[in-house]
Amino acid sequence: MKIRKLSPENYTKVAALLQQAFPGGTYEGQLVENLHKNGTAVHEWVGIHTNRVIAYIAFSNAYNGAAVCGLHLAPLAVNPDFQRQGTGSELLRFALRQEVIKESTIFVLGAPGFYRKFGFEPCPQPLCPFDKNNDHFLSLRNTTTTKFTVGYEAEFTVGAEGGQGGSGTRVSRNTKQGRKWHR
């Protein structure tokens, strides 16, 4: 697999991948489309195999009020034909080594068993608005001790049923959508 920064010519391939990786829903595809359409800062990479986009990862800003306090890892998607073969792990390892990512605090709402393999730990603070007890909310390089609810980019609520408000001017996505995003 070759890993590249996402380029506009691969937007439609990523949209197709998100549809395959998250069947039965359009949330992830709509989110990524809206992030691009609105020019929201996102760090994105794709895994390519024989000219086919087979994996995608994105990081967007996390907020404490209006201040950036880290990055959210979301979504991580792998084509079903390439799942359980290390493709997602390889892409995640690559992304975590990138200059823009490797010094940042990273938050993820996902399967603890998967993300702990990469150094993510349970996250007591900040609070995740989608995980009542922060049971599936993990972080990497997080030194936060202040109690606050982490905010997400506004695009995370577009098309989400029952989206909840986050901190400051940023908003959050709902629990159901958040859990299906991360393995």
Image (cartoon, helix red, strand yellow):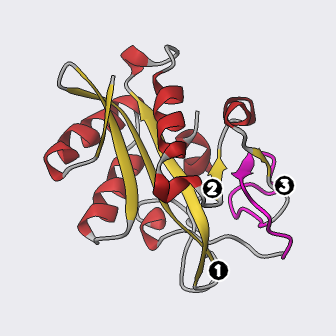
**Disc with the residue nearer the chain's start (2 vs 3):** 2
> Which residue position holds label 1?
167
**Residue 173 in the image, given as x and y percentages of width and height:** 55, 61
Please say if 41 is above or below 75.
below
Residue drawn at x 74%, y 29% as measured from the top left: 113
Q: Which residues are magenta?
A: 126-146
Instruction: Determine whether, in the image, residue 116 is placed left or right of residue 105.
Output: right
Residue at image location 34% in from the left, 54% down from the top = 32
Looking at the rendered structure, the number of numbered marks drawn on it comes to 3
Give the label on residue 101, or none.
none
Is residue 63 found left or right of 123 in the rendered image?
Answer: left
User: Dot 1: what SS?
Assistant: loop
Above/below status of 92 relative to 90: below
Q: Quadrant of residue 81?
A: top left
Amino acid type, residue under disc 3 in the picture? Asn
x and y percentages locating residue 118 in the rendered image: 67, 35
Query: In the depicted view, which residue is nearer to us: 140 or 9?
Result: 140
Instruction: Work out how far the residue at label 1 is from the one at label 3, CA to CA, in angstroms.
Output: 18 Å
Crowdedness of circle 2 by 10 Å Cα count: few (<14), some, many (20+)? many
Outermost residue toward the left in this view? 9
Residue 147, horizontal then vertical, whole percent: 84, 75
Q: Nearer the viewer, residue 141 or 68?
A: 141
Give, as a three-letter code, the residue at label 2: Ile
Q: Quadrant of the C terminus?
A: top right
Q: Earlier in the sequence, mark 1 or mark 2?
A: 2
Q: Which residue is mark 3?
A: 133
Q: Is residue 131 a member of the stretch shown in magenta?
A: yes
Q: Nearer the viewer, mark 1 or mark 2?
A: 2
Residue found 80% across the figure and 64% down from its top: 143
According to the picture, the residue beneath numbered tag 2 turns out to be: 106
